[in-house]
Image (tube, coloured by chain):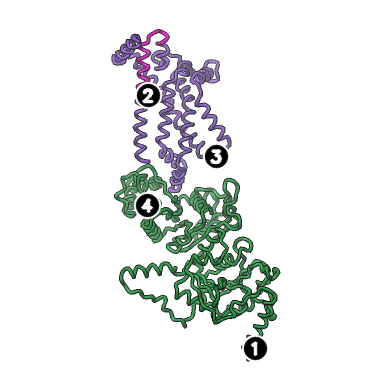
Chain colours: A green, B purple
Amino acid sequence: MSIFLQLKHLRKSLSAGERLFDIDEFSIRDNTCMVLSGRNGAGKTTLLKILAGLDKPDYVDIVYDGEPLSWNLATQKMRLDVVYLHQQPYMFDRTVAENIAYGLRRSGLNRAQVDNKVDQALQWAQLSKLAARNARQLSGGEKQRVALTRARVLSPRLLLLDEPFANMDINAREQTIQLIQRLKSEGVSTIVTSHEPYISTLIGDEHRHLCKTGPCRYTVVKPFLFQRNMTRRPQPATVLEHEEKTRQVKGEPVTRAHTTMNKETSIPQQQITAVILAGGLARRMSGQDKGLIEINGRAMIEHIIEALTPQVGSILINANRNLDQYRRYACPVIEDMMGEFFGPLVGMASGMQAAGTDYLITVPCDSPFTPPVLAERLFHELQDKQADISVAHDSARMQPVFALLRTGLLPSLMTYLEDGGRKIDTWYAEHRLVKTDFSDWPDAFVNINTADDKDSVERKMMQQKDVHTT
Amino acid sequence: MAQLLDTSRQALVLLFSGDPALWSIVSISFSVSLRAVLIATPVAFLLGFLLAHARFPGRRVLISTFNTLLALPAVVVGLTVYMLLSRNGPFGDLKLLFTQTGMVIGQIVLCFPLLVAFSHATLQAADQRAWETAVTLGAKPWQAMLTLMYEVRYGLIAAVTAAFGRIIAEVGSSMMIGGNILNYTRNITTAIALETSKGEFAQGIALGIILLLSALLLNFVLSFIQARGDTAP
């Protein structure tokens, strides 16, 4: 699937001069459905209108079919190839058939050809009965169908649907989803905006999130777009559950084939990325970077990397300071994608963004005794319970930063962070959470917060080594 | 009172007896005003559209100017155009003074601000999505403009009706520019003024009735069209 439209260095300000967004790169592929999420006011509609040539950005470099074009030339092409649909579609004050014929009448076809195409389109959308009605008198769902059909008859390459599911009941929503899927099968790319993060699990090959970052709610500091891996999409748990329900309704026995996984089978190691969270301020260690504190002659993070390497496909380090020192460990170092020291959730989000795998394991940088069974155990519990997040638990309490998460949770996490949420527990509570028991690994969650901690950990590590070597 | 009733009766007799002089006056009135409206409307609507949807320096000033010109008295227009068209005026060589064309020019000046102000208000209030939908469906800007005007056609028709009502009923500019020449530039309003000054009240009232009837007819047509508009909200 090749990229046919690419926007670079896209900048747009509001009329008051406030920067709305500043997007380095935005590409649209042929025959792809992209979900664009983001909070209200993040600029989703404006972005779509720019793509349709209806709104003018402050600055943009456009590459169209591999050819760099000026804005004026590009808008001419975009108006031919791209159709934008309003959240509440506008119906011309004429009949349904005339609404559908609107674009065709201006495309140089003769009357008979137009009538023919309109008839076919009316049948396609099951609107034939309504053909002679004034389009203004239709219901909301019918208007949406007319608008989709009116766009489709023009055979666009890209359809932009602005919040097509807002204010829709389940039936209308289902119908719209089916129409979008049919359009995709006809080779039309679509971009669907939604402020509901989960819509991407229903449709969409790609997911991008447009967000405002930083502490000021209405100032855009830096945009953030993420792209979900197209080929290795995790099967969303919700769908499985839905299938089970329908089977139960039909009276068929529920076969939990996907859960009767052999515990001994290996985990999909290549689909798991670990992120070591070393982005904190370490206030209690007088600001010393905890990941770099030496334990028995080696930086703490080295101990952790050593323990994780056999368990996962790749390891990332999330750090905001001493980046050069962290880069020595031959793992990609990623900085927080937003804010200033907003806490571990931002580190997790940055990890999900960078990972490109279906799963992400997070570990803190100050617990040197990472259990060798961490990934395996967390993963099996996640699979067994069909959960979204698997969190380690010692006998006393949950250890929220030792967790395995589906990277598909990123939109939800972004929404939570943008709303100002910073607490791991609260965000976890929004999802299917499973607690994985690690009470047989008492040292696993020992962490170093003070100089005394460090001494005792060093002693313990020496003892372990002794046990190991003898 | 008796005199008023008597002259009204005479007026009706005149109307239905098909007095050719009377009908010549009526036809001049309508032909001049219709020509003025037909010429002024396209230009005024285009300007109204630009004022509503384009952004250019001086736009606000222009809008205020046209709103102010709504109050322009017909005699002032008559005086100005008279001076421009008279022998010594800048356009004297065109020999348009005391012609129907001169009257049309005066009436265009009179109805133009009204058409601009009303169409601007109507197009300004039009649904922004109509324009965007037309453009995204492949309409060229001028096609999208026509679509937008079609979408707000009832408001625009009302503007034309109001403009026509204003110029068919004005007397000041027609009198000064046209000169009230029988069978050439004498229209309903100038004829009424003349007949009244001669004491021929019956003729004056008959003409007044025609003016009122035409206004009535116009309003009926308008309300009929608007009622159709209501059924398609």
Q: Is residue B213 magenta?
A: yes
Q: Chain of mark 2?
A: B
Q: Which residues are magenta?
A: B195-218
Q: How far apart in space, not on screen, are marks 3 and 4 (Cα)?
A: 36 Å
Q: Which is more toward the observer, B143 or B68? A: B68
Q: How far apart in space, not on screen, are marks 3 and 2 (Cα)?
A: 37 Å
Q: Main secondary structure of the magenta part?
A: helix
Query: Label 1 belongs to which residue?
Result: A466
Callout in the foreground (4, 2): 4
Q: Is residue A451 magenta?
A: no
Q: Which is more toward the observer, A239 or A355? A: A239
Determine the secondary structure under disc 4: helix
Q: Amino acid at mark 1?
A: Asp
Q: How far apart in space, not on screen, are marks 4 and 2 (Cα)?
A: 44 Å
The C terminus of chain B lies in quadrant: top left
Determine the secondary structure under disc 1: helix
Taking the spot 66% from the left edge, 85% from the top edge, the residue there is A462
Residue B158, picture quadrant = top left
Image position, residue A223 (x, y; %): 57, 58
Query: Label 4 belongs to which residue?
Result: A141
Q: Chain of mark 1?
A: A
Q: Using a 10 Å C-alpha cutoff, classify the residue at mark 2 as few (fewer than 14 neighbours), some (14 to 19) or many (20 or more).
A: some
